[in-house]
Image (cartoon, grey):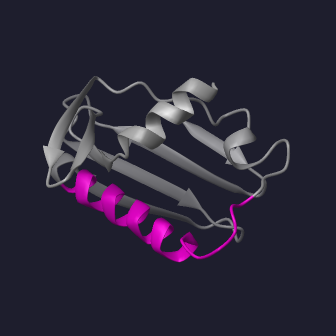
Amino acid sequence: MVKRIGSKAWRVQVSDDGAIIALGIRADTGKEYEVLLGAVDSTPIVTDLLNEMVRTHRDKPPRTFAADAGPNHAKSVPVQPLSTRVEQSGERPVLVLDFGGTVLKVAIDPAQLQQALSAS
């Protein structure tokens, strides 16, 4: 599967047993680079990626996106995890989303979540 946005493209393939994830990225120059990940490595990599995004954007104003970019892009669709649960971690609850080997843990503020749900 190859998806295109602008002049860049990416490809994601997962082995039938779910053990290997291949991420291919085509640069503007046309060269393609491929990274192979084991499913056990995917959780820390995704966590590191998202933590770095939060760190670099924390003190910046919220981003706005064009009508066809970022979260507004036609290919930006909600992802349905295989399972969802809430765990207690210290003083804050943690939303645990399992995507079949990649497990994303998101610290949540219950009051903020309730307010957002009430507003929608």
Counting from the top left corner in percent of width and height, residue 98 is at: 25, 33
Query: Going 56% across and 25% down the picture, which residue do you hit?
Result: 118
Counting from the top left corner in percent of width and height, residue 23 is at: 42, 52
The residue at the far right in this view is 67
Q: Is residue 39 above or below residue 100?
A: below
| Position of residue 62 in the picture relative to residue 94 (left or right) | right
Q: Is residue 49 magenta?
A: yes
**Quarter of the view holding residue 104:** top left
* Foreground residue among 89 and 73: 89
Badge count: 0
Counting from the top left corner in percent of width and height, residue 24 is at: 48, 55
Q: Is residue 71 magenta?
A: no
**Quarter of the view holding residue 120:** top right
Query: Going 60% across and 30% down the picture, which residue do you hit?
Result: 77
Q: Is residue 64 above or below residue 114?
A: below
Q: Is residue 3 above or below residue 55?
A: above
| Position of residue 101 in the picture relative to residue 116 (left or right) | left
* Foreground residue among 2 and 88: 88
| Position of residue 4 in the picture relative to residue 117 (left or right) | right
Counting from the top left corner in percent of width and height, residue 95 is at: 28, 38
Q: Which residues are magenta?
A: 41-63
User: What secondary structure is the stretch in magenta mostly built from?
Assistant: helix
| Position of residue 92 in the picture relative to residue 48 (left or right) | left
Q: Is residue 104 above or below residue 26?
A: above
